[in-house]
Amino acid sequence: MTRTNASRGLVLALGGGGARGIAHIGVLEVLERERIPVRAVVGTSIGAEIGAFLATGTPVIQMEKLASGMDWISTMRLFTPDFGEAGLSTGKGITEYLSPWLAGKRIEDLPLGFAAVAADLNTGEEVVIQSGELLDAVRASISLPGLLTPFRKNGHVLIDGGVVNPVPFDVARSLFGGPVLAVQAHPSVRQHVQHREEELPEWERRLNELLTHPVLDKAPPQIRAWFEGLMRARRENGANNGGRKRELGISSILNQTQLITADMLMKLRMRLSPPDLLLKPDIHDIGMLEFYRARDAIAAGRRAAESHLADIRRLYS
């Protein structure tokens, strides 16, 4: 398959955000329904993953089925620790999950323009991958530090692109021109603070469900020990002191720090090269690894696109 040379259509910039990024599919659903074409897509992290599905010609309805088929246990299988040298997981489960759809495809042969954004761990530089194996590009872009081991490619040690460019609208414009429609799939700092007070009970319920599931019976003992330790940490970090606000825990501090950095990077890049339109789906109550809430995320993306449909149509026209 050769790349089409369409001169009309939107250029998409899809941001990172873990499970929240499934909201991108809701945006794509509206664009498809309204027959608004896309000629190129640039993604960071899960934005690169969903952008890759789009660039291969995967129907949006198929993306919805794949995403909605993920339950809590399936999610944990993707990220179950195998204690790689530089991360909790080597990413083997994710690679196996994506391979039937992305393996064997090269970026330069895709019907749509495509690029994935990653960061070089050694230099701190932004790395834009716009050629080579599609699956490698996605795996590099989703390498969340601490969770997935970095990906080595062409002499680079690559980590999640969100570290340097949370929503790559400036890269999209520089590579493919405009009009650029960007989608932000991470919550603002203030939204995350508001949600933090409500997130612990859901995590407790899901971790309890996992710890009693037969899938762990066949796992190495250190994996069960890791999940039990995670449960203890979550309870300690979220202990309620006489009705007062819960104490900050390590995970909360790390998440909040990441969002502060993302906000600052967004503000700087918006000043230099803003998108023509930025959509912000309301995904603040969806956790980064809550892939089992795909339907909620898709609905949020759909609502965001529909509420700005007149603006999107103006972009295309």
Image: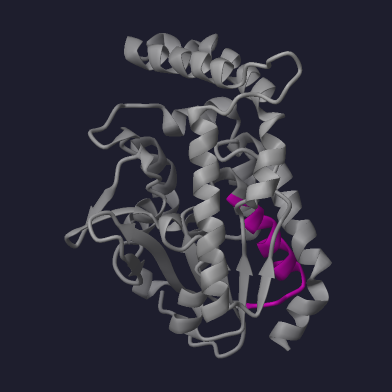
Quarter of the view holding residue 135: bottom left
Could you say where residue 7 lies in the image, as x and y percent from the top left?
Answer: 55, 90
Quarter of the view holding residue 97: top left
Position of residue 126 relative to residue 271, above or below, is above
Residue span colored magenta: 21-37
Residue in view at x 71 percent, y 69 percent: 31
* Residue extending furthest toward the left: 155
Q: Quadrant of the N terminus?
A: bottom left
Could you say where residue 311 lies in the image, as x and y percent from the top left?
Answer: 78, 78
Image label count:
0
Residue in view at x 33 percent, y 37 percent: 92
Residue 285 horizontal side relative to residue 148, left or right: right
Could you say where residue 75 lies in the image, as x and y percent from the top left?
Answer: 52, 32
Residue in view at x 40 percent, y 45 percent: 144
The answer to whether residue 208 shows anywhere in this view is yes
The answer to whether residue 112 shows anywhere in this view is no
Quarter of the view holding residue 116: bottom left
The colour scheme used here is one colour
Q: Is 34 within the magenta? A: yes
Residue 93 horizontal side relative to residue 68, left or right: left
Q: Is 231 within the magenta? A: no
Q: Quadrant of the C terminus?
A: bottom right
Frontmost residue, 34 versus 258: 258
Frontmost residue, 67 versus 250: 250
Q: Main SS of the magenta segment?
A: helix
Residue in view at x 37 percent, y 27 percent: 81
Could you say where residue 169 lies in the image, as x and y percent from the top left?
Answer: 53, 73
